[in-house]
Amino acid sequence: MDKIVDSTDEALKHHIASDVDLPEGYKPSADEEFMNPMQLAYFRHKLQSWRDEIMRESRETLDHLQEGGIQEPDLADRASTETDWSLELRTRDRQRKLVAKIDSALRRVETGDYGYCEVTGEPISLKRLEARPVATMTLEAQEAHERNERIHRDD
């Protein structure tokens, strides 16, 4: 079933969601209207907190790297430190890509597309969104996409 919503209702829903104070311990439930203002506020908060944590860790890494060059006189220690830095930078690069996905998810919250599959238009399960808040497809659509990628990759 496609998501059909009046755009003025959608805009009002998202405006309200930005003003919602979440009760302590609130968790979205399947008993509620899907992506109601409370759920949207919950996922906006979850995504923003995740983004803030990644950015804090990135700043710490940058500060650590700027503290100075590698000081170890021993070649083995120096190689170990360089390997650690390389791993840290690769991790930060993956997190940079994740921040872009989080930003995209936050934009979908604002536009009313969050929580709906970009392929089928069906709601993405709350359980999936809870585990992977940046998900853009239902589990079924994601599995079909991955099967299709494997088939074409083997060509």
Image (tube, helix red, strand yellow):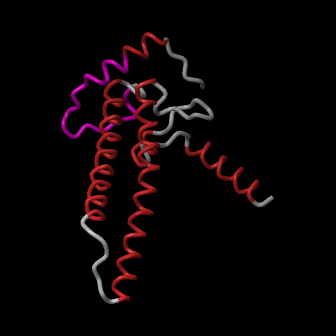
Residue drawn at the location 27% of the way across and 51% of the way down: 56
Q: Is residue 21 above or below residue 134?
A: above
Location of residue 141 by image quarter: top right
Location of residue 93 by image quarter: bottom left
Q: Is residue 80 above or below residue 59?
A: below
Asked whether 50 or 21 is in front, the reply is 50
Please state if 35 lies on the left or on the right of 27 as rendered.
Answer: right
Residue drawn at the location 23% of the way across and 31% of the way down: 22
Residue 23 magenta-highlighted: yes
Please, which residue is most extreme toward the left here? Answer: 24
| Residue bounds of the magenta highlight | 13-32
Please state if 43 lies on the left or on the right of 153 as rendered.
Answer: left
Q: Is residue 35 above or below residue 10?
A: below
Residue drawn at the location 35% of the way across and 31% of the way down: 39
Residue drawn at the location 30% of the way across and 72% of the way down: 69
Residue 74 magenta-highlighted: no
- Residue 152 location in percent, x, y? 76, 54
Quadrant into which the N terminus falls = top right
Quadrant into which the C terminus falls = bottom right
- Residue 150 location in percent, x, y? 71, 57
- Residue 42 location in percent, x, y? 31, 35
